[in-house]
Image: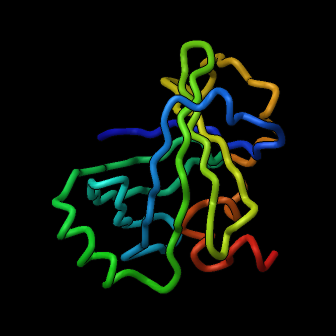
């Protein structure tokens, strides 16, 4: 079983000069119940199907299964998803031993910018760039599956 360990933060400063690559992501949820999600994602010209389990009590770790699928299948599966979709630009920014994924949201989540870092363990040290703000790892409002139901613009 693969476990994803991830921390999530609001972005409060300018990271743009440190971006090494950027890609548009569009994703929807076939299932987004508490404790499990089934996500369809198109990242650039690639499709992915991802299943995630419940987060631990801190919101840092959870089971994750991801499989690359043909782009045409991902496009068709998006049509089966629950209402609401995520549209964002993912920017990669290296810092120390890690690479931050900074998501700049569009559409109904315009104005939201989140940074995520994947870690090998929950207590792994990492460099915290000056553009990182408040940690929101355990705050369900910032889960992408929740942003499809309760978009940032409606807060």
Q: Nearer the viewer, residue 30 or 100?
A: 100
x, y percentage for residue 93?
58, 29
x, y percentage for residue 133?
82, 39
Q: Nearer the viewer, residue 90 or 1?
A: 90
Q: What's the residue at 27%, 73% (across, down)?
A: 75
- Quadrant the N terminus occupies: top left
| Image mark count | 0
- Quadrant the C terminus occupies: bottom right
Q: Quadrant of residue 12?
A: top right
x, y percentage for residue 60?
60, 41
Q: What's the residue at 68%, 29% (across, down)?
A: 17
Q: Nearer the viewer, residue 8 or 43?
A: 43
Above or below, comparing residue 141 to residue 9 in the picture: below
Left or right? Give the position of 13 relative to 61: right
**What scheme was used to colour the molecule?**
rainbow
Q: What's the residue at 28%, 56% (across, down)?
A: 48
Above or below, comparing residue 71 to residue 8 in the picture: below
Above or below, comparing residue 14 to residue 69 in the picture: above
Left or right? Give the position of 67 relative to 144: left
Q: Quadrant of residue 11?
A: top right
x, y percentage for residue 136?
74, 48
Furthest residue in direction front, as rendered: 17
Left or right? Give the position of 79 relative to 88: left
Above or below, comparing residue 116 to residue 144 in the picture: above
Left or right? Give the position of 29 relative to 65: right
Q: Quadrant of residue 78?
A: bottom left
């Amino acid at each position: 079983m693969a476990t994803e360990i991830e921390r999530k933060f609001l972005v409060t400063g300018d990271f743009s000069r440190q971006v090494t690559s950027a890609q548009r992501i569009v994703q929807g949820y076939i299932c987004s119940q508490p404790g499990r999600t089934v996500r369809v994602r198109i990242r650039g010209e690639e499709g992915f199907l991802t299943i995630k389990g419940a987060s631990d009590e801190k919101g840092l770790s959870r089971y994750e299964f991801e499989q690359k699928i043909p782009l045409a299948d991902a496009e068709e599966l998006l049509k089966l998803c629950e209402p609401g979709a995520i549209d964002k630009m993912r920017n990669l920014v290296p810092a120390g031993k890690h690479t931050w994924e900074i998501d700049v949201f569009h559409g109904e989540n315009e104005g939201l910018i989140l940074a995520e870092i994947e870690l090998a363990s929950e207590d792994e040290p990492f460099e915290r760039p000056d553009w990182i703000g408040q940690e929101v790892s355990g705050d369900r409002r910032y889960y992408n599956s929740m942003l499809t139901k309760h978009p940032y613009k409606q807060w």
